Image: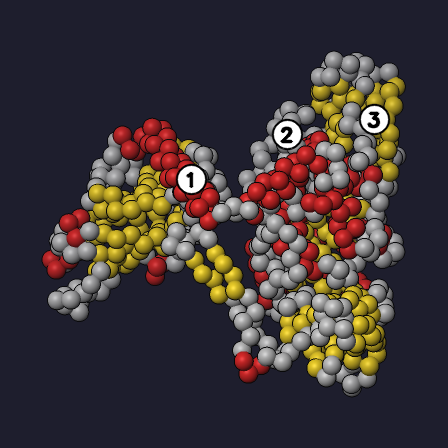
Amino acid sequence: MKSVNQAYFFLTLRTTNNLIALAILAITLPTIARADITLPSVIADHMVLQRDMVVPVWGRAKAGQIVDVSIVDGSGKVINSVQVKSGDDGKFMARLPAMSACKNPLMLKVACAGESVQCSDVLVGEVWLCGGQSNMEWKVEGSIGGDTLAQTLPATVRCFTPDRRMSAHPEADLPTKWIVSTAESAQGFTAVGAWFAAKVGSTLDVPVGILSINWGGTRAEPWTPADIALTNPMFAAIVAEQQKAGATFEHMSPAQMQTLIDEQTRAYQEAISAYWKNLQLKESGFANHWETEPADAAHTWRAAQVPGVFGTVAGTESLADFDGATWWRRTITLPNSWAGRDAKLLLGPIDESDIVWINGIEVGRTTGFWQAPRTYSVPGATLHAGVNEIAVLIVDTQGAGGFSGKAQGMQINLATTDGVSATDANSIALAGEWQWKRGSTSTVHAPNAPQGPTHPQAQSGSFGSMWNAMMAPVVPFAIRGALWYQGESNAGEADQYRELLPLMIRAWRAKWNEGNFPFGIVQLAGFRAASDDPVEGEWSALRDAQSNTVRVVPHCGLAVAIDVGDANDIHPRNKKTVADRLAAWALSQVYARGGEFSGPLYQSSSVQGAKMIVTFDHATGLAGANGAPVGGFAIAGSDGKFEWADAKIEGSTVILSSSKVQAPTTVRYAWSSNPVRANLVNSAGFPAPPFATDMPETKPN
């Protein structure tokens, strides 16, 4: 909450087991204890208010008093105002009349009982919520063309990005602030949201506010309010069970809580032991003692530079897409004064698990925690004067691995330098050339460390856990609509997602109480190695669930991304194309600017002998992308066996046939995780979304 003459401090007290935390909030300094007005963090300096819409302003003031809420221009003229009375609890909800767009800085003033709060540099324009998982969370700085975007994104674009949080119950506020776009700050904005804002803002000539509320790797369930999920037959029992477990948790005694802590700690240690034991059975480097064998070419060791992410530094090119074990060796020469003295070994962060030996003696290991710097104590008995051997086993099971810190963060130094010359007391740098050797492949992730006793309704799989902590605090801040890029973490559960995504949209709209506000959905991008199987991949059905949502839920749009994916990376870097397609939908369907906004949409199909005739909407200028022959279609007969089809375009139809299917009954298009054959586009260049005629339209409960 934002307030005048009041400071909020957060003091965290931890028990000796470092797992239970108590938060003491709102410790007020005696000399500034008079303030009564507080506003949520989303109503603050630099915010963008939604134009042409009633704007809610809420907070707390002195109980039972008149609260004046006004918008003031740069000359001090009141251009909009409203009065409301606060409740017995001090809460108030004011609704400012609709305003036109304004790029000139305004001030929001809230006054009550002789006190006031001002929010400065307020603009009026378009506000969009950008939700989802990592592909929406993905920043400008990591995207193709991101530097150029950051340099050109105007200061009339502002972004509000909460930290990752979960809660069992809806929260009133969260510690976040609006950030004005600059060449530096825009690097940290959501890339999809920033490019969308750039296109919409420049076309409409208005400011754009982005509520960037997302979390990598998350499912849709935690973003769906539990009270509304409880009304759905498919999810009611799950929600009820979570609520029952939550009630039990809230009534646990301290002794019961400690027992739970002990059980979690014991289970985690057992999981770590099992993880390394299983790896040791599989990894030949252990049996052959690669930590001590000669690290030379005769033993197939090769040179590479350290630190660096595998695949990006010299000598590690072959590890760019490798998941598994690699062994690393480095010799150091120690002065006589170091012999027998304790030391500290600093290796920086290692992605993601490691074991470290010096002279064949293990000095430390870390399981998981890919961002944590490695600092290991080295007993004096381990070191001797002259040449010493450092060996590091790195196990990376997903994404890019490696020594991921800075060169200056890699060193070995004495624990104490008493009695050692100034020269000998210097740290010994470890960055530079190391020898490495590839071990076995592995995609078995390290066990996750326990986070302490967590509320069953405040976990990543719990309905509403992220909604409660990250979304609820900004409701009912006026928005034009929402953009949603998620589904990777729900892949494999398409049947449930056909129900879940519409449910989540309905829940958000109910909570905001703005009616059926526009909702743009990004379909899953192409991912994984291309397959020659015409109907391969669980992602296909998830994409169809997304398409089905657009068909059956009003005021939804679809941005197809099958053609801008990356076979080797679940995070394709081309976010601009995705954002441009969302913007085309918004400009055409939300802002009535016209123009094509969709790729060819399946409309109907019919059988003519051995051929299938497929008709499309949004079909002006049907063609294969870049002039190539159209592909990606498969047909099947009554036996259900799909074969690739020859395709011929005639007007708004595609005629399909195959010598292997004499009596076709069914068509599927782009039905694979990475449908590289699929290339049907219209004259606007928008790709056709995947479809299957044997996947009927389904309406959610």
SS state under label 3: strand
Cβ–Cβ under 8 Å for marks 2 and 3: no
Q: How is the image coloured?
A: secondary structure
Where residue 373 sits in the image (x, y, percent)? 38, 54
Query: Label 1 to label 3, Cα distance in Å?
Result: 63 Å
Task: Name the element at disc 2.
Answer: loop
Residue 21 vertical position relative to residue 558 in the rendered view, above or below: below
Numbered tag placed on residue 655 in the rendering: 3
- Amino acid type shown at disc 2: Gly
Element assignment for label 1:
helix
Position in image of residue 484 (x %, y %): 70, 48
- Of labels 2 and 1, earlier in sequence is 1
Cα gap from disc 2 to disc 3, whole angstroms: 25 Å
Q: Residue at x 63, y 37 (%)?
A: 241
> Disc 1 residue type?
Glu
Residue for point 46% across, 53% down: 20
Quadrant of the image containing the N terminus: bottom right
Q: Position of residue 214 (x, y in %)?
A: 63, 52
Q: Nearer the viewer, residue 64 or 447?
A: 64
Instruction: Please name the residue that numbered disc 2 is placed on.
Output: 537
Mark with earlier residue (1, 3)? 1
Residue linked to disc 1: 263
Circles 2 and 1, Cβ within 8 Å, touching? The answer is: no
